[in-house]
Image: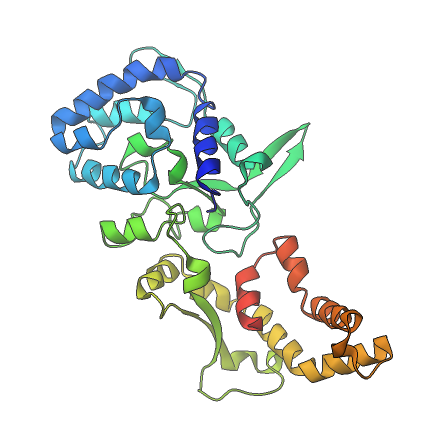
Amino acid sequence: MDYGDKSHIKSLKEKYKSCFPDMAQRQPRWVSLRRSIIQRDRRFRGLLPIQFGELLVLDFECLADIYEVYVSLGLSKTDDLTDDGKSLFSYDKHKDRNGNTWDALQPVIAKFFMDTDNGFEIHTCHYCDMAYVNAYTMNGGKKAQFDLDHVLNKAKCPIIGLSLFNFVPACQMCNGSRIKGQKQLYSSAALRKKLSPTNTAYDFERIVTIEVHNKHGVCSTFGFEKRMDEYEIKFNSFKDPDYSEVVKAFHLEERYNYHKCEALRLLDLKERYTDARIMELARLMVGDDKAKATPHGMRIITQIKHDIFSLEFKKHFHRSFGKLQNDVLK
């Protein structure tokens, strides 16, 4: 998730808080709930802000600390804290046990993420980059065709259920019960904090490389697509082995290998259109044997590469498998 610079993040936080028109009604309920939570564990005194609005925009590292302490309480589903927390931080329209009616918040939050002024890139799933997630227009308004996944499980810790930096736009497969669902990701608190897309230090794009491997250790130099069964997709996380946990959690290797033809096709194109072959085409188009030495010739060479490999097109229009294609073409 890219939240922009410090100035933009500050603006985002204020704009997100404005999505809650009933903030004044929620504040006293939060003060009461916060007091009850602190009575259960004094560590919460330094973790939970007094203002309801500040809890909504806490950085992910702070949310992760709250989550760990809250989960350690081992509260049951029928505990009063659980009930009050789920009510105050619910997505859906509902009536609490005191007779108060709360409006649905899911459409408001989804609209916040779809607002292009906020700078969120919602084109492909932030976990897998395989499935398209997007907003579309219907009956004059925008509709969300994506899930807003809670990185930290709101069922285990309801009080971070509406926090901005706990949301990740995801596809239904990644967010579904077969992969993530309500599972607690990763084996330790440190990994859960480090490996969230909402952590500003998270950098899967740079650290992990998607590679094509020959299963038998011998790489063919022609006809990759024809020998599809001989190859497999591997995710290399040697720069930081912790990132292999992301690959495992979302079953990326298994899922990508179903689509390995995307990578093998690019390898075949690279074999057919070497730099020397592209240079020949450029010379024919420019009518000059020194195409590479002229600005016009260089533009032609660049355009030919774009036309063949579609990299700029896929980048500009945010097509799926973007990282796979970038890594293979490197």
- Is 26 positioned to the left or the right of 299 in the image? left
User: Which residue occupies the foreground of this view, 211 or 3?
Assistant: 3
Q: Position of residue 67 (x, y in %)?
A: 25, 39
What colour scheme does the image use? rainbow
Question: Quadrant of the image for the C terminus?
Answer: bottom right
Is residue 181 in view from this perspective? yes
User: Which residue occupies the foreground of this view, 216 or 204?
Assistant: 204
Is residue 41 in view from this perspective? no
Q: Where is residue 265 in the image (x, y as percent from the top left)?
A: 63, 74
Identify the residue shown where x is 51% and y is 50%: 125
User: Which residue occupies the foreground of this view, 42 or 144?
Assistant: 42
- Is 163 positioned to the left or the right of 186 in the image? right
Res 209 quadrant in image: bottom left
Identify the residue shown where x is 52% and y is 67%: 258
Q: Where is residue 16 in the image (x, y as percent from the top left)?
A: 46, 28
Residue located farthest toward the right when viewing the structure as drawn: 287
In the image, residue 183 sits, relative to residue 137, either above or below, namely below
User: Which residue occupies the foreground of this view, 250 or 239?
Assistant: 239
In the image, residue 46 sits, relative to residue 95, either above or below, namely below
Q: How many labels does the image show?
A: 0
- Is 192 positioned to the left or the right of 175 in the image? left
Identify the residue shown where x is 58% and y is 43%: 134
Q: Where is residue 101 in the image (x, y as percent from the top left)?
A: 39, 13
Residue located farthest toward the top when viewing the structure as drawn: 99
